[in-house]
Amino acid sequence: MQTNFNEVQLTDPSLASANEILRRCVHCGLCTATCPTYVLTGDERDSPRGRIYLMKQMFEDRQVTASMTYHIDRCLSCFSCMTACPSGVDYMHLVDLARTRIEAKGRRSPIQSGWRFVLSKVLPHPGRFRSALMLGWFARPLRAVFARLGLKRTAAALALVPSRLPKTAQANPRSQIGKEPDAKRVALMLGCVQEVLAPSISRAAMRLLRRHGVDVVVAKEEICCGALVQHLGRENEARRLARRNIDAWTALGREKPLDAVVITTSGCGTTIKDYGHLLARDRGYADRAEHVSGLARDITEFIDEIGLLPPVMWTGLRIAYQSACSLQHGQKLDALPISLLEQAGFNIMRIPESHLCCGSAGTYNLLEPELSGELRDRKLANIAKLNADVIVSANIGCMTQLAGGTNIPLVHTVEMLDWATGGPVPQALAKFKNPGHRIEALVELSKQAALVD
Ligand code: SF4
Ligand code: SF4
């Protein structure tokens, strides 16, 4: 694509970077058919190619219009377009640059800006998020009233509040939990939202890693990875959070070198693997950020590297595998988690249109409830074709998004691998009530083998 930046503009590093990315696009349109928003609306401005044109105009003319804001806000950052693009257009970093610009120019309504501000101040902080969740739980029965009053975002947020509030994690996970002298040593990232909604996922990861002889440590100072605020266009906040995590993991590495930083939330994994880029121009952090990015592994990657233990029980459960966008498109890890689940004795079924996002996408389901709802219904309709026993995903966002629309239990990949190799039955399966269903029979079998937590 031909661009028209002048020399002065190109002295601005963000414009120089945008120019480089834009010039790779050859307008072929191969990305459009894989874009969830284009599939739903059929509007070129809701497609990757259309958004790239809008962003070109935004950067060249240094202007942010209401239309640009509207269509770029509707992008999920699912990066399905990057998987499809034959020219290697770095859409991820281009849209991040555009979001930062939109946030700075403030072309949104006060209500939209207010929502975004609140989300950026609540979600990355587990204490605040837990309090918000409790408030939401009390207001949950009123969601139909909010919807009738036209408060669609509030209604959508309440629909995502689980019917039972999650328990706070019991054991103190912020302590060192294993010290084998020659063992591989990893820092397990607990995350922010996941640790509030489903602390059982990190506990399953700890058990799984330790069962494989890995020394697991958790950095006391670790905080949100920064993905949530970065997607809201608040890049400086994302950098601040990234620096804190880098300091925390660097301190752990000084005691004894880390072999990996292991992540169980695929959205966080994509962001941490990109810390090197995020802090590339920060002299004090660039090298350490690159080092941490190099250490970052999705847990399935790490388990594959060390080799999965054989399963203690061959369940043959039928799993609809929801391949989170941040894993399949962001980290290019699509076949690997499936292969591990198959090795663990499960029967994996691909969901039709598996490249399309479920509509969760970080804060997208709270900010764009209509498109998000359509994508969720489409995903659930595709899942319904499979007659699955369980839906498995590597991302708490997908799990929360789909949970409200189905009775099929939702379980994280790591909980399934933990169970298969000798851990307790995942909570969602242990609570599952459907007499005669094979899940109940398997839970009973596990109990007899004393595998229930
Ligand atoms: S990131 Fe996803 S929603 Fe955004 S343009 Fe690309 S395919 Fe479409
Ligand atoms: S597939 Fe790549 S090169 Fe083709 S229009 Fe989309 S972004 Fe541009």
Image (cartoon, rainbow, N blue to C red):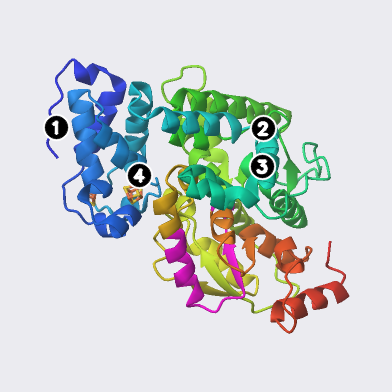
Which of the 4 quarters of the picture holds residue 57?
top left
N-terminal of the two: label 3 or label 4?
4
Instruction: Tell me where residue 325 appears, x and y as whole percent.
Output: 45, 54
At label 3, which amino acid type do we have? Answer: Leu
Q: Amino acid at mark 2?
A: Arg
Distance of mark 2 from mark 1, alpha carbons? 44 Å
Marks 1 and 4, Cα distance to the nearest angstrom? Answer: 24 Å
Residue 433 vertical position relative to residue 174 in the rendered view, above or below: below
Whether label 2 lies within 8 Å of ligand 1 gets the answer no
- Alpha carbon of mark 3 to alpha carbon of mark 4: how far? 25 Å
Q: Residue furthest bottom?
A: 436
Foreground mark, 1 or 3? 3
Image quarter where the C terminus lies is: bottom right
Chain-order first, disc 1 or disc 3: 1
Q: Position of residue 413 (x, y in %)?
A: 62, 60
- Between the residue at mark 1 and the residue at mark 3, the CA separation in whole angstroms equals 46 Å
Mark 2 or mark 3: name the one nearer the start of the chain.
2
Given this view, does label 3 or label 4 mark the residue nearer the observer?
A: 3
In the image shown, does 94 or 276 lie closer to the viewer?
Answer: 94
Q: CB atoms at circles 2 and 3 under 8 Å apart?
A: no
Q: Tell me the residue that label 3 is attached to.
A: 133
Q: Secondary structure at mark 4?
A: loop
Q: Please name the residue shown 35% across and 24% down the image.
A: 106
Does residue 445 show up?
A: yes
Q: Which residue is mark 4?
A: 74
Q: Secondary structure at mark 1?
A: loop
Give the amino acid at mark 1: Thr
In the image, is residue 395 part of the stretch drawn in magenta? yes
For disc 1, the marked residue is: 3
Kindly report the distance in space between the C-alpha atoms of the residues bearing marks 4 and 2.
27 Å
